[in-house]
């Protein structure tokens, strides 16, 4: 039980670092503690990135880093990435080099789900400004 709690705590700090970078000191401490306990490392690797967890992470990341987007933009993102990959972090496009939840060209298959989501949001902001515009483009052209 103690090991699972330590793994959960370590994972929560890792997740929160993406949302709140100022907590990096706490993450460094948690990582240093987990280095001493191999079982914590084992449990940390066992975190399964489900579609639900990926959506929750994306919603939290939008709230933290893209405050002006709002709830309607998250709904557009859910539709967009639902069509692109069904929110599957292992989705692979056999016709191109697109991979992952956002189906970004050239993304490596071993890219973790949180990085896929962050890079996908950055791409949408850079190219379209917000998810609703990317979703409108996808509906018209079948890609974004």
Image (cartoon, rainbow, N blue to C red):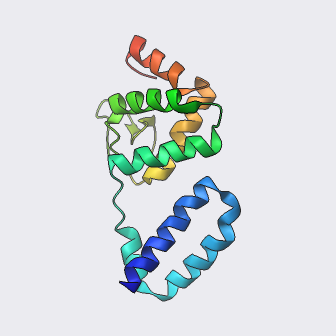
Which of the pair 15/90 is nearer the observer?
15
Give the image location of residue 141, x and y in percent.
41, 13
Extreme bottom residue here?
A: 36
Give the image location of residue 17, x and y in percent.
60, 60
Extreme top residue here?
A: 140
> Is 122 rendered above or below residue 28?
above
Extreme left residue here?
A: 94
Extreme front residue here?
A: 71
Which of the pair 101/106 is nearer the observer?
101
Residue at position x 39%, y 83% in the image: 3
Question: Is 116 placed left or right of 84 in the picture?
Answer: right
Question: Is 48 placed left or right of 61 in the picture?
Answer: left
- Residue 74 in view of the camera: yes
Quadrant in the picture for the N terminus = bottom left
Give the image location of residue 90, x and y in percent.
32, 47
- Residue 39 in view of the camera: no
> Is 19 rendered above or below residue 93?
below
Indicate the quadrant where residue 49 lies.
bottom left
> Is 53 rendered above or below residue 137?
below
Indicate the quadrant where residue 70 lies.
top right
Which of the pair 37/3 is nearer the observer?
3
Give the image location of residue 52, x and y in percent.
35, 47
Residue at position x 52%, y 60% in the image: 15
Residue at position x 33%, y 28% in the image: 83
Question: Is 40 placed left or right of 126 in the picture?
Answer: left
Residue at position x 38%, y 78% in the image: 4
């Amino acid at each position: 039980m103690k090991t699972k709690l330590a793994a959960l705590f370590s994972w929560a700090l890792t997740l929160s670092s993406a949302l709140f970078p100022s907590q990096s000191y706490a993450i460094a401490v948690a990582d240093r503690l987990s280095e001493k306990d191999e079982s914590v490392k084992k449990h940390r690797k066992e975190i399964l990135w489900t579609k639900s967890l990926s959506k929750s992470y994306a919603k939290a990341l939008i709230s933290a880093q893209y405050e002006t987007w709002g709830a309607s933009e998250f709904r557009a993102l859910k539709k967009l990435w639902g069509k692109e990959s069904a929110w599957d972090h292992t989705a692979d496009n056999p016709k191109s080099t697109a991979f992952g939840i956002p189906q970004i060209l050239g993304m490596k298959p071993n890219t973790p789900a949180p990085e896929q989501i962050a890079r996908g949001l950055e791409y949408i902001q850079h190219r379209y400004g917000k998810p609703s515009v990317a979703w409108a483009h996808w509906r018209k052209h079948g890609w974004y």
